Image (cartoon, grey):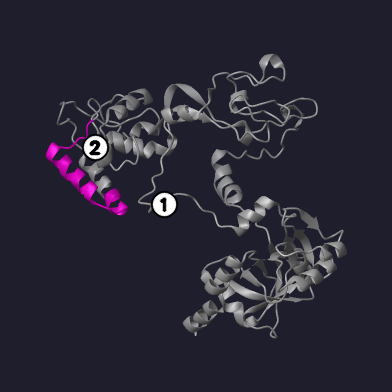
Amino acid sequence: MALVAAQQPPSEFQYEFTKQPYTEDVPNMKIDSICFSKFSGPDIQKLAEVQIWRDKYYEGGGTEPGVNGLLDKHLGPASMTGGKCATCHGDWTTCAGHWGHLKLVLPVFNIGFLPSIIDTLKCICKSCARVLLPEETRRERLRKMRSSKDTVQKSALAKAIVKECKPKQCYRCGYSNGLTSISVISLAKDSKALAVPVLNPVRILALFRRMLDEDCELLYLSERPENFIVTDIAVPPISIRPSVVMSGGAMSDARGIPPNPQQKPLRGIVQRLKGKQGRFRGNLCGKRVQWTGRTVISPDPNLKITEVAIPVLMAKILSYPEIVSQHNIEKLRHCVCNGSNKYPGANYIKKVDGTTLNLRYRTRNAANELKYGDIVERHVEDGDIVLFNRQPSLHRMSIMAHRARVMPWRTLRFNESVCNPYNADFDGDEMNMHLPRTEEARTEALMLMGSSLLSSFLLFFY
């Protein structure tokens, strides 16, 4: 069965956004570099609107959100009937949500940065927090680190510096540094080694805060090392973690769930994030597009290599916004008279004043009232530029521009000579068809992804 995605009647805002290019009143600037870092404790406190320190959701067992709780009104409305936000005074539909923060009693290690914490501790003195290198050697390594532009060379130089920082006695304060051991894991493999004081997060945080910026640059740290230790936890807004209230007013149905006889292990935070079905690839990177169709492909040797046959059903659902002028007004009037159920027809008319007419119900009067400047969402017709794609898109010829030919039946058809660049066969493969909806997009697709790509592909392989 063919799957076609179409849009509801376009609003004025959507039309203006798709027809006019996005511009900003800022000069053109060149991006020099991009640096990724994590939020530090002060950054989280600046971002937050309220501190969370209570474990109660509601006050006194009622329905009023508890102050300084996980449903505090400063984080946003808790439900559609939860009133106004205490920060921006918006309701459930207008408030985007606000962050909170939870101050930890004692700092803890960020387990994602344990290797970086250990490498940094190996390189610094446990008393003065300076790098365990002679001053001349430190200046020479710092000069090399600053002069290098390649990140690979900087990483290799940082690893070499970690290996050089092996002296047990500090060159500046004379403190004797032993083995590096922290309270989470221990690096001492020799059971006969002398006992060393265990470094807890409180002491390590104090050491990292005393480190100089030059030493951080020498060790190729992209941020301050104290950010590797968690002191504050960001509490996300209520809008991204809404509470589901059931009919009885309960917030959880754990009591009514029967025990699982299979004892299936629960998915942890890592399992929910990684993988194809995780949050990043499955939700954040997964997109839905409009004005596209997908169905099974079949061969048609009577078509040109620049053409693709589109089913009539798909051509009636997809539409192209064409502006009425003296050159096409008769054609568009004929399309409007046919309406949305008869091909070739039209689905909507957008008047100059911004109103939209649905042609499913009124056609004859709308055709007579058609004026210059109106926009008619007509059906796809022969000669329209469409983008044809087969996944996986491994190279640039995996998506090319073709000219549409509206034909009967329910499959997308094209000349079998084009199978090679798409790596397609006709054993049940499906392909995607996208409809550019502006003259700029049609011209760009025809010039950059037209049949010239196919000729270069054939010359390369044959």
For badge 1, the amino acid type reads Pro
Q: Residue at x 64, y 81 (%)?
A: 416
**N-term-proximal mark, 2 vs 1:** 1
Q: Quadrant of residue 67?
A: top right
From the viewer's perspective, tell me whether residue 174 is left or right of residue 236: left
Q: Is residue 288 visible?
A: no
Dot label at residue 153: none
In terms of secondary structure, where does tag 2 sit? Answer: helix
Question: Closest to the observer: 208 or 13?
Answer: 13
Q: Magenta span: helix, strand or loop, mainly?
A: helix
Q: Residue at x 18, y 25 (%)?
A: 175
Question: Closest to the observer: 21 or 269?
Answer: 21
Q: Which residue is tagged 2?
A: 214
Q: Which residue is tagged 1?
A: 27
Residue 338 percent location from the top left of the image: 84, 69
- Calculate the distance from the C-alpha at mark 2 to the C-alpha at mark 1: 34 Å
Task: Provide the residue span drawn in magenta.
Answer: 130-156
